[in-house]
Image (tube, rainbow, N blue to C red):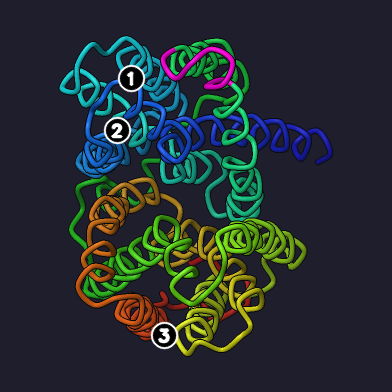
Amino acid sequence: MRSEARGRLVVISALGVVEILAWGSSFYLPAVLADPIAADTGWPLAWVVGGLSIGLLVAAIASPRVGIAIHRHGGRPVLASAALLLAAGHVVIGLAPSLPVFLAGWLLLGLGMGCGLYDPAFATLGRLYGAEARPAITTLTLWGGFASTVCWPLSAFLVEQVGWRHACLAYAGLHLAVTLPLVLGLIPKAPALSTEGGAGHGADVPLTVRERRAFLLMAGVLVLGGTVMTLVSVHLIALLQARGVALAAAVSYGALIGLAQVGARIVEMANKGRYHPLWTLTAAMSLIAVGLAILAAGIPAVGVALVLYGAGNGIYSIARGTVPLALFGPVRYPVFVGRLARPGLVAQALAPSLGAVALTYGGADAAYGLLLALTLVNLGLASALWGTRPHGAEGSGAVG
């Protein structure tokens, strides 16, 4: 048992480093590199930042097929492909002579994101550990929570020392020298698919009535959750300044979100799966709703609001991986994760523009109202998911 636990720890730690580099070199990249790129090239900042939206849309298109590939072949070859695609994308971006070539690099990064962010990593763990994957998924999100903490300073250091182009080339090198060897060396091959149960376990089996309802509700949760998360990530500083918070204080307040995310994930780990994952999802939506309600009401408790929001967002990342495992079971888990990833990624791609429209035409009050409304609807969807649990999943830690 000890050797098995040690082996899982090695796998999760390797995946943790992979996730830090995957998120830090893609989703979190424009936060540091966008301004230097626009200043150096003269390309419109909106288009430079829009590369991320393009990448997310490409990832959304690819996600269902990624899920099927992991279901059939395991996550190791898919994650290895992610490392190669992310490296190739960074090479193209780092050498891009023009804006179209730069955006073409984001097409490659988008494919890499579709093969290498949380959803493929969750699916990989589900394929390896089946119904026992929940603790591994929870631990992996704790690693992933450090992506911006590690890569924002790293990106800033590289830009200052060697410029944005060589910073991209450095990330390409990291994926080839660190991510790829970790995947090939430490992520085991997935066990062969069981034939027990016949065609019912196939990737193309039709959904039951219960599964269809659960799928639609969970897809709605991911769409609204991804929209809220991205809106806050992109527009938080502007929203806080609209409430009279100075820029330096707004940045400091924003740092509380990351700390709260990690703290909440540690608490979730300490509970060791004693309760159904839907409790995690319901708690996440409740914390996010209370935090955003405080901000929307203008109550002078910004720090408390952001800690609540951050804690909710932290365990929401866990729930998006563990709830599908509980509702759909482990056998086709990679397939469902791949299908569910698409609407959430599309929402994340479109959310920055939605927030900009709300701020431009309705001001901060409209943006806060939008965030709160989306979260309250999401809380309702999360509550409705309780009625879709499979029979026999009444126990506190049941995974279906």
Residue bearing the label numbered 2: 110
Q: Residue 251 location in percent, x, y?
A: 59, 57
Which one is earlier in the sequence, the residue at label 3 or at label 2? 2
The CA distance from mark 3 to mark 1 is: 40 Å
Kindly identify the residue that appears in the image at 29 percent across and 30 percent down. 111
85 or 234: nearer the viewer? 234
Q: Which mark is residue 383?
A: 3
Q: Residue 87 location in percent, x, y?
A: 41, 16
Identify which amino acid the numbered label 2 is placed on.
Answer: Gly
Please give left or right for residue 111 compared with residue 325 in the image: left
Kindly identify the residue that appears in the image at 30 percent across and 39 percent down. 49
* Label 2 close to label 1 by CB (< 8 Å): yes
Residue segment shown in magenta: 158-165
Identify which amino acid the numbered label 3 is placed on.
Answer: Ser
366 or 398: nearer the viewer? 366
Residue bearing the label numbered 1: 89
- Eyeballing the image, is 60 above or below 229? above
Q: Is residue 70 visible?
A: yes
360 or 167: nearer the viewer? 360
Q: Which mark is residue 341?
A: none
Crowding at dot 1, Cα within 10 Å, few <14 / some 14-19 / many 20+, comes out as many
Q: Is residue 385 visible?
A: no
Kindly identify the residue that appears in the image at 44 percent across and 18 percent down. 168
